[in-house]
Amino acid sequence: MLSTVRIDDEIDLVGPLGKPFDTSLFENIEHGNSELHVKQTPAAVALLVGGGVGVPPLVYLGQMLHRSGVAVHAIIGARSSAEVICGAELNLVCERVSVTTDDGSHGHKGRVTDLLPQLIGSLIEMNGSLPVIYSCGPMPMLRAVASICAQMGVKCQVSLEENMPCGIGVCNGCVVRARQPFAAEKARPQNKRDLNEVVGNEWSPYQAYRRVCVEGPACWADEIDWEHNHD
Amino acid sequence: MIDLETTIGRLRLRNPVLTASGTFGYGEEIADLVDLNQLGAIVCKTVTRRPREGNAPPRTCETAAGMLNAIGLQNVGIEAFIREKMPFLRDCGTAVVVNIAGESVEEFASLCRVLSDVEGVSAIELNISCPNVAHGLDFATDPSVTEDVVAHAREATDLPIWVKLSPNVTDIALIARAAEHGGADALCVANTFVGMVIDVRRMRPRLSNGTGGLSGPAIKPLALRAVWQCAGAVGIPIVGVGGISTALDAVEFLLAGATAIQVGTATFVQPHAATMIAEGIVDYLGQHEINAVSEIVGLARNL
């Protein structure tokens, strides 16, 4: 439909929908009750990791973070140099943009995850603090990025993709499998704020699958059961 | 003043436009977008005895003029439904029809018994026709099983019982009559049609479940035909559903013999579809100088 509209045509829009990237780790926030105040040390470095058409959403994020004084780095990947997008926009707000192409026609030959571990390592060393990773792109890429971040102990936000019939949380069509609490413990939901369907205070099978359109599309990578999600 | 009041058996609704089960969540999710006071009723997502995970994704895909879904009845379960969802629903400003599914005749009856004691339930819709769960269609494809499940539900509650039929049968009128014999107050015609899509890139079915239920404009002529056939076979009211996107679509179903209609997939394209359809029916009646929507029910049948 969007390919056929012309200037001055009217279209219907519903939005904004869903959860945007969580940037709260960069904020100065006090946690806790009146007895115990824990001041969160704001993070200072963000690493944007994008693949293919997953890169554009990271541009606005990069611009916002840059404006708030965060040091932004990026790794972007595409199949070939012709498909590398938003390099120029990212260069304006990033300290460094690394590019990878599957065919080697531009930048590093290979995938974004080839460069990721080393870049995370050097950012930790350079800054003495943990960067926050933001990733958007095909599911196999997100899975690999999430795995590396988990291994290296850095927090990672991913923007998920799934066919969304309604986009407003009423059909349960766009779900992803969420990380389950261990069967042995009747655990409380890990992230109560994210689980709209808290059923009493106990985890319910209903919560095994979460809606990308309202409990996402952006969420923490460690909330997803990567092994049991399809590509 | 054009009268949209609609009577389905003992139940009086403000208008004939309802929302279809599975397309409106439990109402609260969409209440800030849609004015529920303009709907005849909401039909909730199917509730089962135990909470259900639902099917693995991919659960949906688009088709020409429609979509396939294989949600798999993901729901919070009857206990959580009553505790967490009914408080909003009983005060939401419109009638509430609770759609239920059981794995056995006894389970259907038991759910009916439980709901009889719940304040705010206007009617129970028996989902004997879900194509996306094991044994889901077993009830609706066999007339004697249909009659049996309805009869047991009938014994278990005084609430109005609507039976949602499956169109994936050779003769839907046969099933309709069986449901009527069992004691149904109304029929909901019809659930989705079983279909599938193959992903040629991955060389396998697009949906994790293999098949799914087809809905949307593509099925409208089929659902309409089912309504026509059922209206000719039973005396109880029919709630027509399947592919209705506009007011004129709804009018077709009313003229065919449906007393009321449900809007489902259209809500995904336009969240206000149901309320817009209600307004459009008023326009149609006005244009034809008809004062009450009840006057056009089955009018196309008077040949």
Image (spheres, grey):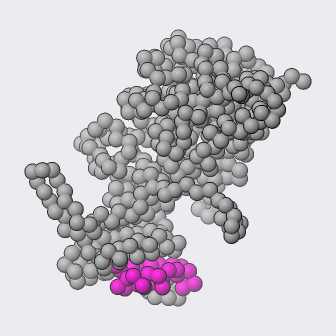
Q: Classify the position of the N terminus of chain A by image quarter.
A: bottom right
Q: Is residue A89 magenta?
A: yes
Q: Is residue A199 visible?
A: yes
| Count of picture labels | 0
Position of B5 with respect to A111 (left or right) is right
Q: Position of residue A25 (x, y in %)?
A: 27, 65
Position of A8 with respect to A78 (left or right) is right
- Give the residues drawn in magenta, as a range: A72-99
Q: Position of residue A167 (x, y in %)?
A: 52, 52
Q: Position of residue B168 (x, y in %)?
A: 69, 34
User: Which residue is the extreme one toward the left?
Assistant: A35
Q: Position of residue A79 (x, y in %)?
A: 53, 79
- Which residue is located at x 41 percent, y 52 percent? A215
- Which residue is located at x 50 percent, y 88 percent? A106
Q: Is residue B231 above or below residue A4?
A: above
Q: Is residue A182 magenta?
A: no
In terms of image quadrants, where is residue A156?
A: bottom left
- Which residue is located at x 54 percent, y 42 percent? B34
Q: Is residue A103 above or below residue A182?
A: below
User: Which residue is the extreme one toward the right?
Assistant: B303
Position of B252 with respect to B127 (left or right) is right
- Residue closest to the eye, A136 or A72: A72
Q: Is residue A118 above or below residue B289?
A: below
In terms of image quadrants, where is residue A205?
A: top left
- Which residue is located at x 54 percent, y 36 percent? B36
Q: Is residue A117 visible?
A: no
User: Which residue is the extreme one toward the front?
Assistant: B1
